[in-house]
């Protein structure tokens, strides 16, 4: 960074150089990534994590072993919770959301909905009866189908459609009237 006397001053090891307009300032690595020890200048991408955390493919610091959860300052083996429960961030078992058979540790996001229910896109911890089926959620392991409780809301004037859709026929959505020859 540049100090008041226009001299270049290096950032500390746990900081990175960030350009803000005409000035350059040192920003903490942990601003972008929790548990980050060192990061790259300008981007702030984490390059090394505090022990015992490891850098994952998303440039985030996470627990090194499958089945471990981050309790804030350490990695612990997730509690052995019963079916329909998950280990929260304090490693205590909590019930999964409404109509949710299985859910992710820490977040409680549902990964398997009960039969005839779909993942509520407005609250991924719960499963609901679908008014509108939107598609599958690829980023969740069990990939339940996603749905909304209603086609319309205060913030949505047309029904949603899957992000993978390449052709949307607005006539099917009732937005445009069919062509009459």
Image (cartoon, rainbow, N blue to C red):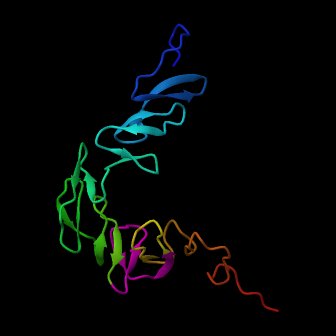
Is residue 15 placed above or below 95 in the rendered structure?
above
The residue located at (36%, 45%) in the rendering is: 54
- Relative image position of residue 9 (x, y in whole percent): 49, 15
- Relative image position of residue 43 (x, y in whole percent): 53, 36
The quarter of the displayed image where residue 95 is located: bottom left
The residue located at (31%, 60%) in the rendering is: 107
Extreme residue in the right direction: 181
The foreground one among 69 and 99 is 69
The residue located at (70%, 84%) in the rendering is: 177
Extreme residue in the bottom direction: 181
- Relative image position of residue 140 (x, y in whole percent): 41, 67
- Relative image position of residue 76 (x, y in whole percent): 21, 52
Start-end of magenta stretch? 115-135
Residue 4 forms part of the magenta stretch = no
Residue 120 forms part of the magenta stretch = yes
The foreground one among 27 and 59 is 59
Is residue 20 placed above or below 59 in the rendered structure?
above
The residue located at (36%, 42%) in the rendering is: 34
Quarter occupied by the C terminus: bottom right
């Amino acid at each position: 960074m540049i100090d008041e006397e226009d001299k270049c001053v290096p950032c500390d090891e746990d900081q990175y150089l960030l350009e803000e307009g005409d000035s350059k300032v040192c920003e903490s690595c942990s601003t972008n990534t929790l548990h980050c020890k060192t990061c790259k200048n300008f981007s702030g991408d984490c390059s090394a994590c505090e022990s015992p955390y490891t850098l994952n493919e998303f440039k985030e610091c996470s627990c090194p072993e499958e089945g471990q959860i981050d309790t804030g300052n350490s990695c612990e083996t997730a509690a052995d919770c019963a079916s329909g429960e998950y280990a929260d961030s304090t490693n205590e078992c909590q019930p999964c959301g409404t109509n949710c058979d299985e859910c992710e540790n820490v977040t409680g996001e549902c990964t398997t909905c009960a039969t005839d229910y779909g993942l509520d896109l407005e609250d991924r911890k719960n499963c609901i009866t679908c008014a509108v089926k939107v598609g599958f959620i690829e980023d969740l392991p069990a990939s339940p189908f996603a749905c909304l409780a209603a086609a319309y809301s205060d913030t949505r004037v047309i029904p949603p459609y899957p992000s993978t859709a390449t052709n949307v026929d607005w006539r099917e959505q009732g937005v445009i009237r069919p062509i009459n020859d």
